[in-house]
């Protein structure tokens, strides 16, 4: 499957409002991701406030409550993508922002831990603003600017993941935990209003008719490139998350001052996201010029190489620098994954395919910590870095082999 086939059958869905749409989606994705992640610093405290007293139970319920959102989102992402293909991507963003406004506001009124978990599940089921934004920007942006636009959007998503816990750590001491949830709900309501009244989606009755008749995944003639991007998204998140369970223990082995272990561990976890934020739009713009598959293969290969010395570092600064560089390398993957899928499926099935891509990324977020903790505990912490390097290298080779030969996208 090559890009030229779709150019002969489907007009490029551009819109005069694409820059304004990108800005609205960028700000909306940033705020909704903050709202989803700000509870991390105070979640165990809130679980205790809701009546859970046993320390082990507090940890268990905190993990369940946090993971519930991403578990639910992984299940419904393809469904929302499919419905977006049929009924419009703007409608999906309105649904997501309104649903998250209600869910996150109600979290501040939860009476017990079961209600909190239920509302976290509802957030995952009703949300998906960031993934919906990716679909809308991918389909409404001129092709020659799609890598840059998707890179900007990816930077906003990653920035939200970085800022969310910082906001959650600072705000409750001023307005309380319940007030923090209500404030987050109010901010997302503003996103809902901006999406409803300012975002403009190009109407396409032909796309809607084709989406209803296409059968989604079945309508993609060459599934190879799409499957490669699903695997790449999985590997991206797995590589980012695999060291999460072992990082504090690993840092404790290489620092002299044990009182600084927590601070250094936090820095190690954050610098990869910072590197990705700084590089995403630049690598997306580069991919617009030299080809998405080239950037994807190079990013995976460089990240695999950078993982090898991480297994043998002797000081904290070495690990921090290597994680930052790895974040820089991986920052271009999200916009390139989205762009490749966008240009290798018919317009009527883009939302469904990108929904599957989001699900694969959530699967990586879940599998990464589980596999990293298992391998680190039973084989050794160095094996986590080396094993992840092998997986990324294999994914790079696979992506290079399945890339379209005639015209690279």
Image (cartoon, grey):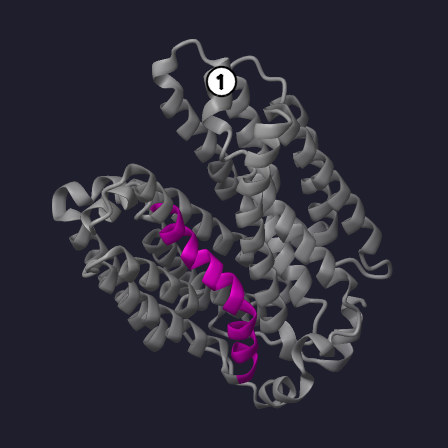
Question: Whole-percent x and y of residue 321?
Answer: 53, 24
Closer to the camera, 328 or 245?
245
Where is residue 213? Give x, y as percent.
66, 89
Left/right placement of residue 279 relative to residue 388 reads: left
Can residue 311 be seen here? The reply is yes
| Res 108 quadrant in image | bottom left
Is 164 placed above or below 19 here? above
Front in this rendered view, residue 208 or 138: 208
What residue span does the magenta drawing correspond to? 62-86
Residue 68 magenta-highlighted: yes
Measured from the top left, where is residue 277 in percent x and y?
48, 43
Vertical relation: 295 (above or below) 137: above
Q: What residue is at 79 percent from the left and 74 percent from the top?
A: 221
- Dot 1: what SS? helix
> Would you say the magenta stretch is mainly helix, strand or loop?
helix
Magenta stretch containing residue 217, yes or no? Answer: no
Residue marked by disc 1? 316
**Does the image show residue 281?**
no
């Amino acid at each position: 499957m090559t890009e030229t086939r779709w150019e002969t059958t489907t007009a490029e869905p551009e819109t005069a409002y694409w820059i304004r749409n990108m800005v609205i989606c960028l700000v909306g994705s940033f705020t909704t991701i903050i709202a989803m992640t700000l509870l991390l610093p105070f979640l165990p405290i809130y679980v205790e406030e809701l009546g859970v007293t046993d320390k082990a139970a507090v940890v268990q319920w905190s993990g369940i409550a946090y993971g519930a959102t991403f578990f639910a989102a992984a299940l419904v992402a393809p469904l929302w993508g499919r419905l977006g293909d049929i009924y419009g991507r703007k409608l999906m963003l309105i649904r997501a922002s309104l649903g998250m406004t209600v869910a996150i506001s109600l979290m501040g009124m939860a009476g017990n831990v079961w209600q909190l978990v239920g509302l976290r599940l509802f957030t995952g089921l009703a949300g998906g603003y960031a993934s919906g934004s990716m679909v809308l920007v991918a389909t409404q942006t001129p092709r020659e600017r799609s890598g840059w636009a998707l890179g900007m959007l990816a930077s906003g998503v990653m920035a939200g993941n970085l800022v969310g816990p910082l906001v959650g750590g600072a705000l409750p001491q001023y307005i309380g935990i319940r007030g923090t949830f209500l404030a987050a709900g109010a901010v997302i309501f503003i996103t809902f209003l901006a999406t409803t009244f300012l975002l403009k989606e190009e109407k396409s009755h032909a796309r809607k008719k084709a989406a209803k008749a296409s059968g989604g995944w079945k309508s993609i003639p060459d599934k190879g490139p799409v499957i490669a991007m699903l695997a790449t998204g999985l590997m991206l998140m797995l590589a980012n998350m695999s060291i999460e369970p072992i990082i504090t223990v690993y840092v404790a082995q290489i620092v002299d001052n044990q009182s600084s272990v927590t601070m250094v561990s936090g820095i190690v976890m954050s610098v990869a996201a910072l590197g990705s934020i700084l590089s995403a739009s630049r690598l997306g713009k580069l991919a617009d010029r030299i080809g998405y598959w080239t950037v994807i293969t190079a990013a995976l290969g460089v990240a695999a190489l950078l993982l090898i010395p991480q297994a043998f570092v002797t000081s904290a600064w070495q690990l921090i620098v290597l994680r930052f560089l790895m974040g820089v390398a991986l920052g271009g993957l999200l916009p390139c994954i989205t762009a490749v899928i966008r240009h290798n499926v018919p317009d009527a099935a883009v939302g469904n395919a990108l929904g599957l891509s989001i699900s694969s990324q959530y699967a990586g977020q879940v599998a990464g910590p589980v596999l990293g903790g298992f391998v680190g505990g039973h084989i050794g912490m160095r094996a986590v870095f080396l094993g992840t390097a092998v997986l990324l290298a294999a994914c790079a080779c696979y992506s290079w082999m399945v890339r379209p030969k005639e015209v690279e996208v």
